[in-house]
Each structure stands twice: as C-alpha cells, then as structure tokens.
Amino acid sequence: MTTKEKIMAATKQLVASQPFNNITVTTIMTVTGMRRQSFYDHFRDKYDVLAAIYSTEVKRAVRYCGNYRFWPQTLLSMLQYFDDNRYFYQHVLKLDVQNAPEEVIKAHLRSMVGSIFKSLGDYEKVSIDSDYCSFLQGTLGAALYHSLKKWLYESNAVSLQTEYQFLKYYLEDGINGFLLRTRRLSPSIQQNEIA
C-alpha cells in the first residue's frame, strides 16, 4: 500500500469512528504511523483526502462510466459502491464546507451523464446539441445526486435493487424520449408539438 493509500484508508477508518470535525491531519497521520509532513506530499487538506477516496474508489467500482451501451451496469455498480460505503458517505455528505466532497461527486455525476449522452449520439448516430448536452449534464446529474443522497439517508430506504430500478427507469425514459424525438418522429409531428 502506498503512502497515499494509507492516508486514505486511515481517513476512512477515522470517519467511521468519530465526527469529521474532530479529525485533523495529525490524527490521520498518527493512525498511519507516518510523519505529518508526508500528508502534504499528497493532499492539500483533509477534505482533499475525501475527494481522493471517492475518485479512486468510484473509478474502480464503475468501469464503463461513460459508455452508453453499459450505462445500466454503471448505474448498478455505482449504487452498489454507495451501498457498500453507506455509513462513510452518510457522514461525508453531511459536511457543509467549501471543500466538501459533495462537489466532486456532483461533478463526477455530471461528467458521467455527459459522457453517456455523447456516447449515445455516436452509437445511435444522432446529433446532440452541446448546449442541450450541458443542460442534461446539470439536470440529470443533480437529480441523480439528490436521489442518491436521499436513499443513503432514509432510515426506511428502499432496497438497492429497487433504487436501481427506479433510477434506471428514470434515465431510460429520458434516453428513449430523446431518441424518439430525434430519430423516430416525423417532421410534421415535431412541428405540431404543444408549446
């Protein structure tokens, strides 16, 4: 295990046992058994560690992140990752500070949605306007984040499989609606749409 990985593991361990506000760089480095300065060779602050944990672990968990053909597997893998790390993220997503990892997660979800829709355009041979793609990234990314966070915090949350089905249907309906509008509707029907 590298120094960076040891710092990430120690931080994750500490988050499970105490409030994040009580965790300091010194606390983290005491758990690793390394000197405090080694921390700054890899991270700016303790919030940077949380962002690295998410980025590193989600990359391993969600292999086909930007590929349209595999988006259902990507969604299931992502939900499985959050379910496996539920307690950790219940603590991490409560943080309301400037460097909180919430923005890293939201940015990842926006990027994932954008990549999937760009891949969809290539695969289905349809053109996606870049402004509309940006809109989809923001809107769907925010919806995914909100739904995920709600699911993580609910005491009587639906099962992983049910949450997956709900999100899959939501995204599928959007993708199928987009494909219907761009490829399968005749021009006369498009002109008669209700404003």
Image (tube, helix red, strand yellow):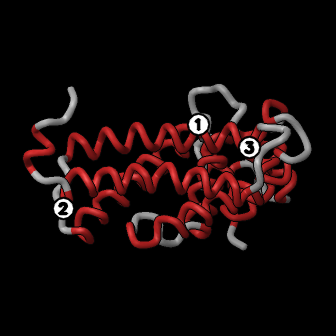
Q: Amino acid at mark 3?
A: Leu
Element class at badge 3: helix
Camera sees residue 24: no
Compute the Cα span from label 2 to label 1: 29 Å
Coordinates of residue 177 in the picture (x, y in percent):
33, 51
Compute the Cα span from label 1 to label 3: 10 Å
The residue indicated by pointer 1 is 146
Reading the chain from its start, which is encountered first: label 1 or label 3?
1
Q: Residue at x 8, y 45 (%)?
A: 188
The quadrant of the rendering that contains the C terminus is top left
The residue indicated by pointer 2 is 126
Residues tagged 1 and 3 counted as in contact (Cβ below 8 A): no
The circle drawn on residue 37 is none
Element class at badge 1: helix
Q: Amino acid at mark 1?
A: His
Residues tagged 2 and 1 counted as in contact (Cβ below 8 A): no
Q: Determine which quarter of the picture holds residue 9.
A: bottom right
The quadrant of the rendering that contains the N terminus is bottom right
Coordinates of residue 152 in the picture (x, y in percent):
74, 43
Compute the Cα span from label 2 to label 3: 36 Å
Element class at badge 2: loop
Reading the chain from its start, which is encountered first: label 2 or label 3?
2
Q: Which circle, 2 or 1, is nearer the viewer?
A: 2
The circle drawn on residue 152 is 3
130 and 99: which is toward the camera = 130
Q: Which circle, 2 or 3, is nearer the viewer?
A: 2
Q: Residue at x 20, y 59 (%)?
A: 184
Mark 2 surroundings within 10 Å by alpha-carbon count, few (fewer than 14), some (14 through 19), many (20 or more): some
Camera sees residue 162: yes
Q: Residue at x 27, y 57 (%)?
A: 179
Reading the chain from its start, which is encountered first: label 2 or label 1?
2
183 and 14: which is toward the camera = 183
